């Protein structure tokens, strides 16, 4: 890696990233060995963010580097305005992406070329529906964030009353959501005899494949019960667990790519760790991802639970305390003694006991692994990014563990403190007096509740779409009230010290 750094420092100018400039990129940076003109599409991916490009697209790229999976290239797609901005950037560079791996020991980079197109982002999703309806499309994959599945956070059921879902149900041929577009494409394939495809969720949902099935089948049922039955019986929805820490891209990341000799408008930095565990359930075939390091397993739920409870819930343990104490990154959170002590104690005493071991990994050893990964100073994963959409992330990652701990009669002191820190963070001001910019799609709701809880802590728990019956659990409610009162009266650091003691 030192040789790479020496090489890129000698570069006099960054090479614009395009297919016709790959030969001009520093030889120490890996580029596609395959001829991209020979690739044909097999996958439509909706939600082309950094995680997808550093994870699923990389696994496919790795196969292509081995002269495999040439008929499984990715066509990108999206349904939101941000997707259109990403489309413009990627099309200008022939859908190539610079992946920059940030290890504690140094930096390495490669150019990923497994995506060959990006569909127009349209209000009624005509181009997306047309591409998914083609027989060549055999997998439709998704990274639309854990909050993008129209699921009621408390009941866990499909929210048929959501305005976007109601629109798609009433206008099934001009849908506005990704799920409505999938239903419309499957309706067309059913009519033409093109057959089903696999819907592959790669989001951080518990049983993400089952969730995708529920949303798509339920949406189809609102307008065409026969189609819903066909989708349910014919399509595949494999559950999967995906893992790689991938920070957001900003000016620093773009500048880092330039120091490596590449002018990339949308580079991706990532940690030196990847994991992908998925069920082997693909109704129309699949690439041999296991040859690139993925794991096909019937125990996805155990892997998923370990990751979601220890890593994803662990992010929430850190992020709100970090925001309050002005720690800008997750690595800085881990370097702050009070926050890292909170993390270690909550993980080992209140989260790990409700996680099963998986082949080659115990819960305690996974906690050790996550502590190492979160402490990597090369990864500038911002506290703000991790804290974003706390309503979805706390209900999805933290509160299920809290319910299990209460049912088992275990301690909930640390988890109650985590919830109190979230409530304090949503008041919108740090301990140093600086303002916290609104950081939740439901910011008005959570900030109003946080302000009411400053005087009466239990007001925070009276958000039925967040806590439901948990608000009536005395052990949790009493502990939460104690911690939030202490935070407001003596400060975050004092509360962390009290818990650690």
Image (cartoon, rainbow, N blue to C red):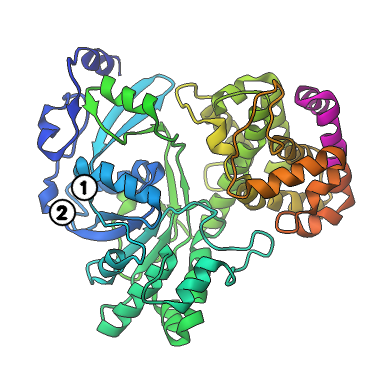
Instruction: From the top left corner, tell me how far across and down residue 159 is, in percent.
Output: 59, 68
Q: Quadrant of residue 447?
A: top right
Figure check: 74 above or below 252: below
- Judging depth in this view, the residue of 448 and 183 nearest the camera is 448
User: 186 left or right of 177?
Assistant: left
Q: Are marks 1 and 2 in contact (CB under 8 Å)?
A: yes
Residue appearing at x 55%, y 41% in the figure? 361
> Can residue 398 be seen by looking at this rendering?
no
Which is nearer the eye, 52 or 303? 52
Q: Which residue in the structure is indicated by mark 1?
A: 64
Of callouts 1 and 2, the N-terminal one: 2
Distance Cα–Cα, label 1 vs label 2: 9 Å
State the quadrant of the N terminus.
top left
- Residue 498: say if magenta: yes
* Region rendered in magenta: 479-500
Q: Is residue 204 above or below residue 1?
A: below
Mark 2: secondary structure: loop
Residue depicted at x 56% and y 48%? 358
The secondary structure that most of the magenta stretch takes on is helix
Residue 422 percent across, percent down from the top left: 70, 39
Mark linked to residue 465: none
Query: Is 480 included in the stretch rendered in magenta?
Result: yes
Q: Nearer the viewer, mark 1 or mark 2?
A: 2
Q: Whole-percent x and y of residue 135? A: 23, 72
* In the depicted structure, whether residue 237 falls above or below residue 452: below
Q: Is residue 492 left or right of residue 80?
A: right
Q: Position of residue 112 (x, y in %)?
A: 25, 40
Q: Is residue 183 visible?
A: yes
Q: In terms of secondary structure, where does tag 1 sit?
A: helix
Q: Which mark is residue 39?
A: 2
Within 10 angstroms of label 2, few (less than 14), some, or many (20 or more) residues? Answer: some
Residue 343 horizontal side relative to residue 370, left or right:
right
């Amino acid at each position: 890696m030192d040789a790479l750094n020496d090489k890129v420092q000698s570069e006099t100018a960054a090479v614009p990233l395009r297919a016709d400039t790959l030969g001009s990129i520093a030889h120490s940076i890996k580029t596609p060995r395959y001829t991209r003109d020979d690739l044909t599409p097999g996958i439509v991916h909706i939600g082309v963010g950094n995680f997808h490009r550093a994870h699923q697209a990389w696994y496919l790229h790795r196969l292509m580097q081995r002269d495999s999976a040439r008929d499984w290239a990715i066509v990108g797609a999206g349904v939101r305005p941000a997707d259109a901005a990403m489309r413009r950037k990627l099309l200008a560079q022939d859908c190539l992406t610079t992946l920059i791996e940030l290890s504690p020991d140094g930096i390495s980079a490669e150019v990923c070329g497994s995506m060959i197109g990006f569909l127009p982002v349209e209000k009624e999703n005509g181009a997306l529906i047309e591409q998914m309806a083609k027989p060549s499309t055999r997998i439709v994959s998704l990274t639309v964030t854990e909050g993008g599945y129209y699921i009621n956070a408390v009941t866990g059921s499909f929210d048929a009353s959501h305005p976007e879902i109601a629109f798609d149900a009433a206008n099934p041929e001009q849908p506005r959501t990704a799920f409505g577009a999938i239903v419309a494409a499957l309706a067309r394939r059913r009519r033409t005899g093109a057959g089903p495809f696999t819907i592959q969720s790669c989001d951080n949902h518990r049983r993400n494949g089952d969730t995708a099935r529920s949303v798509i089948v339920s949406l189809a049922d609102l307008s065409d019960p026969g189609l819903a039955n066909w989708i349910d019986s014919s399509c595949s929805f494999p559950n999967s667990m995906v893992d790689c820490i991938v920070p957001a891209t900003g000016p620093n990341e773009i500048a880092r790519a330039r120091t490596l000799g590449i002018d990339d408008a949308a580079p991706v930095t990532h940690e030196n760790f990847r994991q992908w565990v998925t069920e082997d359930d693909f109704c129309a075939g699949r690439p041999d991802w296991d040859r690139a390091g993925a794991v096909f397993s019937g125990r996805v739920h155990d892997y998923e639970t370990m990751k979601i409870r220890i890593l994803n819930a662990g992010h929430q343990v850190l992020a709100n305390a970090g925001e309050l104490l002005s720690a800008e990154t997750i690595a800085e959170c881990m370097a702050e003694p009070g926050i890292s002590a909170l993390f270690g104690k909550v993980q080992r005493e209140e989260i790990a006991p409700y996680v099963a071991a998986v082949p080659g990994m115990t819960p305690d050893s996974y906690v050790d692994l996550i502590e190492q990964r979160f402490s990597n100073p090369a990864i500038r994963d911002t506290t703000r990014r991790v804290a974003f959409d706390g309503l979805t992330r706390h209900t999805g990652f933290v509160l299920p563990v809290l319910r299990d701990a209460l049912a088992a009669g275990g301690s909930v002191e640390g988890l109650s403190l985590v919830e109190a820190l979230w409530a304090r963070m949503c008041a919108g001001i740090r301990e140093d007096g600086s303002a916290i910019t609104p950081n939740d799609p439901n910011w008005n709701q959570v900030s109003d509740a946080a302000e009411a809880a400053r005087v009466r802590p239990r007001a925070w728990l009276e958000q039925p779409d967040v806590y439901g019956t948990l608000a009536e659990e005395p052990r949790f409610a009493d502990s939460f009230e104690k911690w939030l009162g202490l935070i407001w009266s003596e400060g975050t650091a004092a509360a962390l010290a009290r818990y650690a003691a």
